[in-house]
Amino acid sequence: MERYERWLWGRRVSRNSSSFYMRNLRAMCNVLAKKGVIADAGLFANVYTGVAKTRKRAVAEGVLARVRDADLTLFPKLAYCRDLFLFSFYCRGMAFVDIAYLRWRDIEGEYIYYTRHKTGQRLEVRIEPCMEEIMRRYAGSAEYVFSILTATDWEGAYRQYRTAICSFNRTLKSLSKLLDIPVLSSYMSRHSWATIARNKQIPLSVISEGMGHNSESTTQIYLASFNQQVVDEANRSVISI
């Protein structure tokens, strides 16, 4: 496990991603140990399985409003990318992989019911008018809500997803440059939803439930720190002796 961890870090896998892989492996090994297939030899005692504090990747409401209101008539590719980013935000930070694999059968009445690829947790999101507008505008095949994937076999769909998310992030960079805003990424909509919800005094337990987290400590990772200007003013007040 230690060699595997070093290999991951050597490939520039982030500390939290490495921890995520290790926790999944540990869970599988625990199941095997209970069945007597392997002995519990403390395989994960010396590898990192925690959650490290990360650089916050949220943008302010004003930036999101500029993205939403931008006239991209002459840039259809950027408009499509922008709308997928907003759809993610509207859906409480739905991950790009879950948007890509979203199927029409996941929609029942006024709700989207889907299972997060990352955690396997089942979530339901009420369809708001802004979300429905985007789904109708970019309706995909008879199976998928969006036209990100066309393959029906697992391997083909996964290859298309990997290509799509790389293209999505590149296009977000181009959109950010055009609008002269902080560089957006596929994760920013999720971080931004959590941070804006916190700023609106929504309880942490509700934010955690909305994002599909198993614990509130995970939600804390997504929440941006206090505004630096507020901290600076507090310090100025304290040292003015």
Image (tube, rainbow, N blue to C red):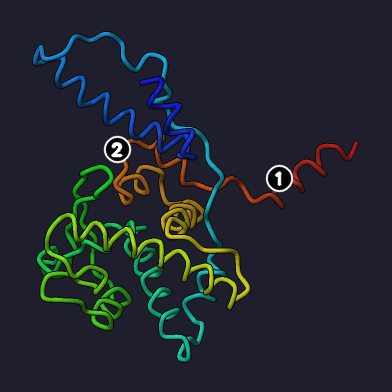
Residue located at (19% from left, 60% from top): 156
Question: Mark 2 to mark 1: distance in Å?
Answer: 30 Å
Q: Position of residue 195 (x, y in %)?
A: 49, 53
Label ID, residue 231: 1
Q: Which residue is mark 2?
A: 214
Going from the N terminus, do you reach mark 2 or mark 1 first?
A: 2
Residue 241 versus residue 49: which sits nearer the camera?
A: 49
Q: Are marks 2 and 1 in contact (CB under 8 Å)?
A: no
Residue located at (19% from left, 51% from top): 115
Using the image, determine if residue 59 lies above or below residue 194.
below
Q: At numbered mark 1, what does the secondary structure look like: helix, strand or loop?
A: helix
Residue located at (33% from left, 50% from top): 211
Residue located at (53% from left, 53% from top): 57
Q: Amino acid at mark 2?
A: Asn
Q: Amino acid at mark 1?
A: Val
The quadrant in which the N terminus is found is top left
Kindly indicate the quadrant of the structure image that contains residue 59.
Answer: bottom right
Q: Residues within 10 Å of mark 2 (few under 14, many from 20)?
A: few
Q: Position of residue 22 (x, y in %)?
A: 33, 28
The quadrant in which the C terminus is found is top right
Residue 238 versus residue 58: which sits nearer the camera?
A: 58
> Which residue occupies the extreme bottom position in the image?
74
Using the image, determine if residue 227 lies above or below residue 34.
below
Q: In the image, which is nearer the foreground, mark 2 or mark 1? A: 2
Kindly indicate the quadrant of the structure image that contains residue 180.
Answer: bottom right
Using the image, determine if residue 234 lies above or below residue 22.
below
Q: Position of residue 150 (x, y in %)?
A: 18, 70
Q: Residues within 10 Å of mark 1 (few under 14, many from 20)?
A: few
Q: At numbered mark 2, what does the secondary structure look like: helix, strand or loop?
A: loop
Using the image, determine if residue 84 lies above or below residue 203.
below
